[in-house]
Amino acid sequence: MGIEAATVHETFTKMQAKLSKVVPEVELRLKAELVYEINRLKKERGALILGHNYMEPALFHTVPDIVGDSLELSRRAAETECDPIIFCGVRFMAETAKILNPSKTVLLPAKVAGCSLASSISAKDVRDLKAKYPGVPVVSYINTYADVKAESDIICTSGNAVRVVQSLTSDRVIFLPDQYLAANVARETGKQILFPRPDDASPQGNVMIGWRGACEVHERFTVEDITNIRTQFPGVAVLAHPECPPEVVAASDFSQSTSRMVEFVRSSTSPHFLLLTECSMADNIIAENPDKDVLRLCSIRCPHMNEITLEDTLNALRNNEQQIDVPADIAARARVALERMLAA
Ligand code: 13P
Ligand code: SF4
């Protein structure tokens, strides 16, 4: 066995030790060579790989230097001195990294990697809302594209949305574009959520004006799913991401960002856990906590997060693909809204 074959074998052995409960051995054998090459090239280029919690387990547990939720990854992207930054997540996340650290090359290992929330609203939609409700601050979810961020006053993530809304002095807030996250945050901040029709009078009082965007993954979970699982697995702790409909969040035991969900499972002694979110995350938790019984409803995958593969991560490192660019004027305005969030 040559030196390279020996080190690929070592990579495979490490992957097997961590992942054998969630990834078939034959797949690990095929992916070990990619993992080895990515890590070698990453070191050679002085690159940083960021990985969102939704990455598939054979990627998530092997190549990122930092893993986390949108908020944690934004902070780390803003701070790093490494160049390039490879963002194993979706496009709006890679754009956020570029906006926060503009001198660095940011690469997304996929051609598209969209998001149903980010594509549900345009910059013009935000301008129209601002014209209709002058002076009402606009809070946009990080799951939006740069031009929408540029029209916003402040950005939030699932991990800090309540804090960001509470940081504003105005009673009225426009919250975009996730109707369910808006409804969940409105409940937690004591606001009334409204979706005004074009002819409605301007809402007054302690209100949140929402938009009808939704996550194509989280919108599909139902209270009936939770009831069925509670019957089948007594004592199960149900964790619902705040992009789930409000009745689903109300029927769950815990609702926070993906990283806080990971921490909950780590530290809880519940006999079973049900994760209502993208199911790769459950595989990632099981790989790290093999003694925990983690259930998931895996009929729905995020097609955008699943575009990111080890093959394309290697391609990004080798060929500088796909490079993220944000026009300077848009980036400058979006950065103000993002920096307000980081300071909130
Ligand atoms: P988090 O910020 O909680 O990781 O969520 C990102 C996301 O896209 C959830 O669908
Ligand atoms: Fe967007 Fe939903 Fe996929 Fe998250 S899970 S990236 S919100 S489509």
Image: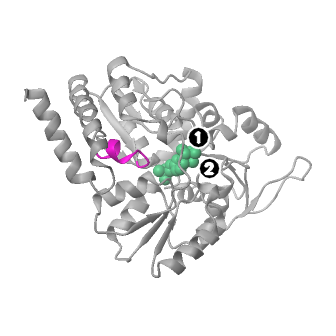
Q: Nearer the viewer, residue 6 or 320?
A: 6
Residue 215 marker: 2
Task: State the residue at coordinates (29%, 28%).
Answer: 47
Amino acid type indicated by mark 2: Cys
Residue displayed at 29% across by 63% down: 289
Q: Mark number for residue 243?
A: none
- Residue 80 in view: no
Label 2 SS:
loop
x and y, in percent, of residue 82 in the image: 29, 29
User: In the rendered image of this protein, does residue 331 appear above or below residue 142?
Assistant: above
Q: Are marks 1 and 2 in contact (CB under 8 Å)?
A: yes
Which mark, residue 115? 1
Q: Give how far apart the Cα atoms at labels 1 and 2 are.
A: 8 Å
In the image, 133 versus 230, the foreground residue is 230
Q: Amino acid at mark 1?
A: Cys
Q: Residue furthest right?
A: 199
Magenta-tinted stretch: 53-61
Q: Is mark 2 within 8 Å of ligand 2?
A: yes
Instruction: Locate the N terminus by quadrant.
Output: top left
The verdict on label 1 being within 8 Å of ligand 2 is yes
